[in-house]
């Protein structure tokens, strides 16, 4: 299916919900725009692309998404600059990753163009929903799920691809404290950890609930073999600063190849910040905390942007991190958001104009 934006039919809502939205008090991902993009895979091809009013779906109870969790998703944002121009950030990376995730979950990949043309058509119709305030953006959630039916545990023959959007503020409110997990695992070699598959997140909820009872917002996952190495958090890649060196784990079968992560690595490289992409032992982080060289931990992701971690728990003990005036976290947050909101040069061509 090759499609261009002009070929996508638009069914508009009779009355926009936009006037009801309090743009000064946006939570994350809880109010949704007027429209969504929808497309169906049936008879071996993607078809019926359309912009339709946002709203509930009618699904057969035997749809395989309900039984076998066959679904993948993406997370991206649209930003508005001071002049009111609208931008995306590296959208081709999300398009690529959605197909990588889809292939792992035996979901048919999207043909070239469908993702971007559908997204552009949707954002043209719902453009006024992109917040104009710094710190807010339009969170975009493309997702594909098995809408085909049957109790047989095998891939569905029908799928639905939807792009829905939610004007959003910060993902975390307040300080972020994390627990380094040793009992549960998020992913295993040969598994689906590198894919943005819905089930990866469902599997994290219970251990994260246990951590929340102890006052932690997120879990930092460690390797599933011996829980010796730091991997990533529930919705973010993790960076560690020891001395002036910035460290992060290499991506693998078990770790999502984050777009924010790779953007930070590129910026750090260009700025000559000492950088090590390697396996990081939990014991090394504990030792650095003990000798005062552990300066920062921060998470990086589309929803979370760059989120400094104020403390972490490990084996029943809490470790506080210093508050720095010149943190790498605030530096990278500024560099990335300046590019996203068109406040600075874009030396790597990451900004994608929507106008
Ligand atoms: N790791 C996980 C498990 C995530 O869900 C996310 C969020 O998308 C990330 C890392 C960060 O990826 P990105 O920067 O592409 O949003
Ligand atoms: C994102 O950062 O876009 C994500 O997909 C994380 C999500 C679980 C909120």
Image (cartoon, grey):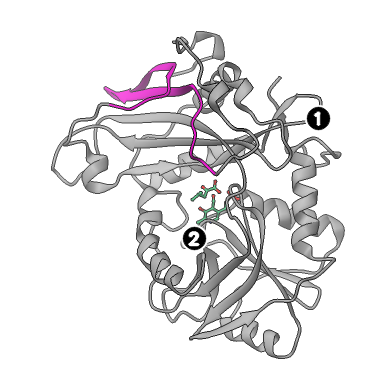
Residue furthest toward the left? 151
Q: Which mark is residue 281?
A: none
Residue 185 in picture, x, y percent from top left: 40, 70
Identify the residue position indicated by label 1 in the image: 82
100 and 198: which is toward the camera: 198
Q: Residue at x 52, y 62 (%)?
A: 252
Instruction: Tell me where the magenta segment starts and ends, as one range.
Output: 28-57
Q: For residue 81, what is the image quadrant?
A: top right
Identify the residue position indicated by label 2 in the image: 234
Q: In the displayed structure, does residue 149 sit left or right of residue 141?
A: left
Rendered view: 161 above or below 267: above
Circle 1 SS class: loop
Q: Magenta includes 156?
A: no
Residue 188, visible in the rendered structure: no
Q: Magenta includes 48?
A: yes
Q: For residue 327, what is the image quadrant?
A: bottom right
Residue 203 in picture, x, y percent from top left: 35, 60
Q: Residue at x 73, y 90 (%)?
A: 291
Q: CA distance from mark 2 to mark 1?
A: 33 Å
Q: In the displayed structure, does residue 30 sit left or right of residue 321?
A: left
Residue 255 in picture, x, y percent from top left: 51, 61
Q: Image quadrant for the C terminus? A: top right
219 and 253: which is toward the camera: 219
Q: Is mark 2 within 8 Å of ligand 1?
A: yes
Residue 319 in picture, x, y percent from top left: 62, 82
Rendered view: 88 above or below 188: above
């Amino acid at each position: 299916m090759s499609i261009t934006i002009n070929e996508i039919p638009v069914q508009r809502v009779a009355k926009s919900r936009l006037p009801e939205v309090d743009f000064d008090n946006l939570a994350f991902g809880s109010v949704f725009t007027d429209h969504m993009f929808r497309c169906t895979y049936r008879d071996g091809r993607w078809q019926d692309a359309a912009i339709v009013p946002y709203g509930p779906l009618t699904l057969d109870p035997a749809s395989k998404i309900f039984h076998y969790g066959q679904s993948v998703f993406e997370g991206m944002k649209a930003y508005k600059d001071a002049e009111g121009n609208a931008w995306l950030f590296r959208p081709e990376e999300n398009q690529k990753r959605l197909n990588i995730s889809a292939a792992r979950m035996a979901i048919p990949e999207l043909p070239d163009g469908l993702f971007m043309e559908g997204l552009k058509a949707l954002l043209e119709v719902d453009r006024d929903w992109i917040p104009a305030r710094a710190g807010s953006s339009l969170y975009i959630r493309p997702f594909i799920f098995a809408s085909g039916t049957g109790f047989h545990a095998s891939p569905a023959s029908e799928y639905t691809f939807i792009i829905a959007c939610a004007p959003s503020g910060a993902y975390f409110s307040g300080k972020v404290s994390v627990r380094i997990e040793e009992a549960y695992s998020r992913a295993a070699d040969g598994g689906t950890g590198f894919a943005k598959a819905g089930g990866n997140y469902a599997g994290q909820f219970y251990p994260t609930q246990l951590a929340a009872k102890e006052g932690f917002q997120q879990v930092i996952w460690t390797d599933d073999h011996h829980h010796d190495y730091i991997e990533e958090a529930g919705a973010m890649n993790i960076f560690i600063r020891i001395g002036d060196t910035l460290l992060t784990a290499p991506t693998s079968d078990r770790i999502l190849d984050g777009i924010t992560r790779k953007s930070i690595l590129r910026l750090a490289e260009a700025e000559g910040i000492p950088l090590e992409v390697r396996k990081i032992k939990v014991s090394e982080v504990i030792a650095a905390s003990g000798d005062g060289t552990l300066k920062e931990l921060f998470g990086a992701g589309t929803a979370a942007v760059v989120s400094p971690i104020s403390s972490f728990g490990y084996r029943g003990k809490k470790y506080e991190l210093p508050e720095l005036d010149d943190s790498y976290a605030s530096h990278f947050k500024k560099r990335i958001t300046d590019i996203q909101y068109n406040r600075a040069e874009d030396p790597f061509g990451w900004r994608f104009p929507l106008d």
